[in-house]
Image (cartoon, helix red, strand yellow):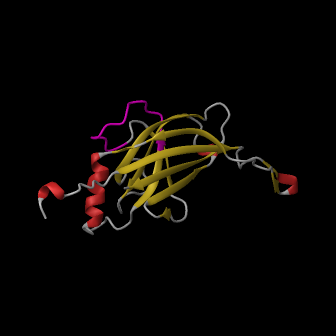
Amino acid sequence: MAVENLVLDRLAIIGNVRVYSRRPSFLAVPEQNLAWPFGDWKLECRADNLVVTAGKVLVAKMLMDESGFDTGLTRIEVGTGTTSPALGDIALVTATVRKTIISSPIRTGNVVEYRAFFPAADITANLRETGIFGHSTAGAGLGSGELFARTLITFNNATSPADATIVWTLTFG
């Protein structure tokens, strides 16, 4: 086949983040052992993410089945940093809270969705950044593991704390 007949196909990883909130789950009626109706989830913000260089290396190492890279993406972290994401980022600027991705990621064709739940009591801050992390070293400690992607968000949860669910959607194509 001649080179001029080749069709170049590039693998792109495009992602976005959505932050949803609802009335805090800690509101309860103790004497009746009943929880308040929490209400519907409300979309607070949406932002496109930047897959950082470390995230691209993470994918390459997963494809090679290198040791420690068989766990995929497992943690979502939020923080108060306001510095724009850059390819060289390896952590959030000012990380505050990290949660494990709940249940299994949802995959539909070439689209994968990751979710993490943040109770209101854990995120009483003006959240401005979020990141998703992978590798077997991605534990409960802030900044541990390999940063895959990072983005800036706008979710002020300081004055009227609400529960939040952060949804990362990654499209491979």
Q: Position of residue 66 (x, y in %)?
A: 25, 67
Q: Quadrant of the N terminus?
A: bottom left
The main secondary structure of the magenta stretch is: loop
Q: Name which residue lies at 27% across and 69% down.
A: 65
Where the C terminus falls, by quadrant? Answer: bottom left
> Which is nearer the eye, 43 or 77?
43
Residue at the spot 38% in from the left edge and 47% down from the top edge: 149
Total marks shown come to 0
Q: Is residue 90 magenta?
A: yes
Residue at the spot x=61%, y=44% of the render?
A: 20
In this rendering, position of residue 108 left or right of residue 64: right
Q: Is any atom of residue 100 visible in this view?
A: yes
The answer to whether residue 26 is above or below residue 110 is: above
107 magenta-colored: no
- Residue 75: x and y in percent read 45, 55
* Res 140 visible: no
Q: Position of residue 163 (x, y in %)?
A: 65, 45
In this view of the protein, which residue sits in the foreground, 12 or 56?
12
Is residue 173 or residue 70 the one in the foreground?
173
Residue bounds of the magenta highlight: 78-91
Does residue 45 appear left or right of residue 159 in this picture?
Answer: left
Name of the residue lying farthest toward the left: 2
Query: Residue 86 is drawn in which quadrant?
Result: top left
- Residue 10 percent location from the top left of the image: 28, 53
